[in-house]
Amino acid sequence: MRKFRTAALAGVATAALALTACGGGGELSGDDAAEQPTAEASATFEAGTKMAAINEAGTIKIGTKFDQPGFGLANLQNVPEGFDVDVAEYIAAKLGVPADGITWVPSPSAQREDLIVNGDVDMVVATYTINDARKERITFAGPYYVAGQQIMVAADNTTITGPESLKANPDQKICSVTGSTPAENIREYLADPSQLVEFAGYSDCAAQLESGQVAAVTTDNVILTGLVANSDGAFKLVGEQFTEEPYGIGITKGDTAFCEFINTTLQEMSEDGSYEEAWNATAGQYEGTEVPTLPAADPCV
Ligand code: GLU
């Protein structure tokens, strides 16, 4: 029996429970124990813009993950912490919204576009890959980071060494998350569609791997790195990354002004050192990660 349940993983379990308790779409308010950016008291925005509305309200609803160590993981107060959270807090501060004006909305992969389209959130910062299918329904600011898909297995698994091993081992199931790009990307490597098992969140996949129900988990390298770091030696990464996953910030489709504001703000975050600081305080804590450089923004259209 592998020893697995570390304090940090207990946090994953808590997040999963909290998600169950509020049906996966519950809203939570609170602030993060990490250092907070100071809200810009004097920020002013053109009337009628999303920025002006948020600034005037002094509150913002932000969608993020609650079960992904390093990017968005709920703490014991059920408030998320991680790189996505810090990026989102920086943007909120530039809009004049302090941390206690943020309502964090758990945003499982398959629900992100709906949350934006339905107006349940003002923006989604949630390891959210920019792609054309999603752009049909929403607009992305960014990218602010570029991840890549990889595979995680149990530490004693020597059979799965990368995506190419899957076809030859049809009995070894692989877990990913419904509505995620990795769940789609992995299909071409499968012996059969039933080799892929899908769950609502990555903590579910980690639990399946821990109990031996699946042999592997696939998603972005940085998400897996956090799960490996919290597995107390039970999990490992195998193979190289085999996709590019540029992370964007999802907003209402066609809101070019808000998109441009976010891109300018990301640039400021990089220039004043907050981007690197946020990375080092969160995902950068895990072995094997490197401080990223802010990628050039895509044009806002
Ligand atoms: N970046 C990928 C995606 O947006 C995987 C991570 C996730 O599911 O949040 O689908």
Image (spheres, rainbow, N blue to C red):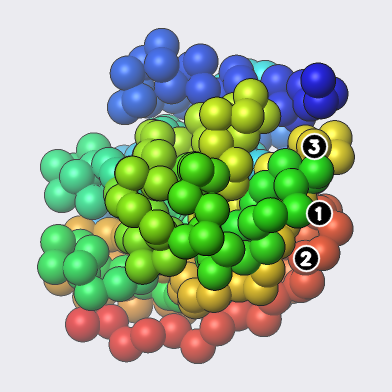
Mark 2, secondary structure of its residue = loop
Residue 138's spot in the image, x, y percent?
20, 62
Estimate the spatial distance between the alpha carbons at disc 2 and disc 1, rounded to whole Å: 6 Å
Residue 159 occupies quadrant: bottom right
Amino acid type of disc 2?
Thr
Mark 1, secondary structure of its residue = loop
Quadrant of the rendering where the C terminus is positioned = bottom left
Q: Which mark is residue 289?
A: 2
Mark 3 lies on residue: 234
Residue 215 showing in the rendered view: yes
Judged from the image, the quadrant occupied by ligand 1 is bottom left
On screen, 278 above or below 205?
A: below
Task: Name the residue located 47 percent from the left edge and 50 percent from the top edge.
Answer: 170
Amino acid type of disc 3?
Ala
Mark 1 lies on residue: 286
The 10 Å Cα crowd at callout 2, few under 14, some 14 to 19, many 20 or more, is: some
